[in-house]
Amino acid sequence: MLSERKAQEEMVGFALIMIIVAVIVLIFLSLSLRNQEEEIVENYEVDSFIQSFLMYTSDCADGYQPRYRTIEKLIIDCNKHETCLDKRNTCEVLDFTLEEIVNEAWKVEGDRPVKGYILQITSGNSVILNLSNGNTTNNYKNSLQKLGKDDIEIIFSAYY
């Protein structure tokens, strides 16, 4: 009878040790997961955004057989001061179209994770387009894309 009681005490002690170890492991695990801040905006998202909006087709035709300019072509044509078939300025179409795209893709109002953005398109020392919205912070991801022979640079920064 005495040995049975000792065995029961040892089993209860072992169970208590296992419970204490499990609680310590859970506390350690929750603290380590809480400290890992996940990036809100990744580099590939900013790069992909530039690549995708360059392929977007605008409503600016460049010939009688309607061929509509992509944003990439609009940027190049804006730099050359060309017009659409309907006599609209390519720079105005570029500004309007990109503002719609960027505002829809990178919403900054309210409690959104993205706090602001800046999109700048330059050719040499001249600015073709400069769009910004929201606030700039110390946390940001940006990307640079070069176009054509005219030294056109597209720089997009997303702040979070």
Image (cartoon, rainbow, N blue to C red):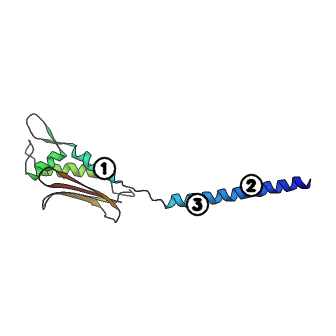
Q: Residue at x 24, y 47 (%)?
A: 53
Label 2 vs label 1: CA separation? 54 Å
Q: Position of residue 124 (x, y in %)?
A: 12, 59
Helix, strand or loop at label 3? It is helix
What residue would you read off at disc 2?
15
Label 2 vs label 3: CA separation? 20 Å
Which amino acid is tagged 2?
Ala
What residue would you read off at disc 3?
28
What residue would you read off at disc 1?
105
Disc on the earlier residue, 2 or 1: 2
Q: Residue furthest front?
A: 3
Which amino acid is tagged 1?
Ala
Q: Residue furthest right?
A: 1
Q: In the rendered view, does 17 fall on the left or right side of 61? A: right
CB atoms of marks 2 and 3 within 8 Å: no
- Nearer the observer, 54 or 102: 54
Vertical order, 66 against 119 (above or below) = above
- Nearer the observer, 32 or 112: 32
Q: Residue at x 22, y 46 (%)?
A: 54
Q: Position of residue 71 (x, y in %)?
A: 18, 46
Disc on the earlier residue, 2 or 3: 2
Q: Residues within 10 Å of mark 1 (few under 14, many from 20)?
A: few
- In this rendering, the label closer to the viewer, 3 or 1: 3
Q: Residue at x 34, y 66 (%)?
A: 138
Q: Residues within 10 Å of mark 2 (few under 14, many from 20)?
A: few
Q: Residue at x 27, y 59 (%)?
A: 133
The quadrant holding residue 112 is: bottom left
Helix, strand or loop at label 2? It is helix
Which amino acid is tagged 3?
Phe
Label 3 vs label 1: CA separation? 38 Å
Q: Position of residue 90 (x, y in %)?
A: 12, 48
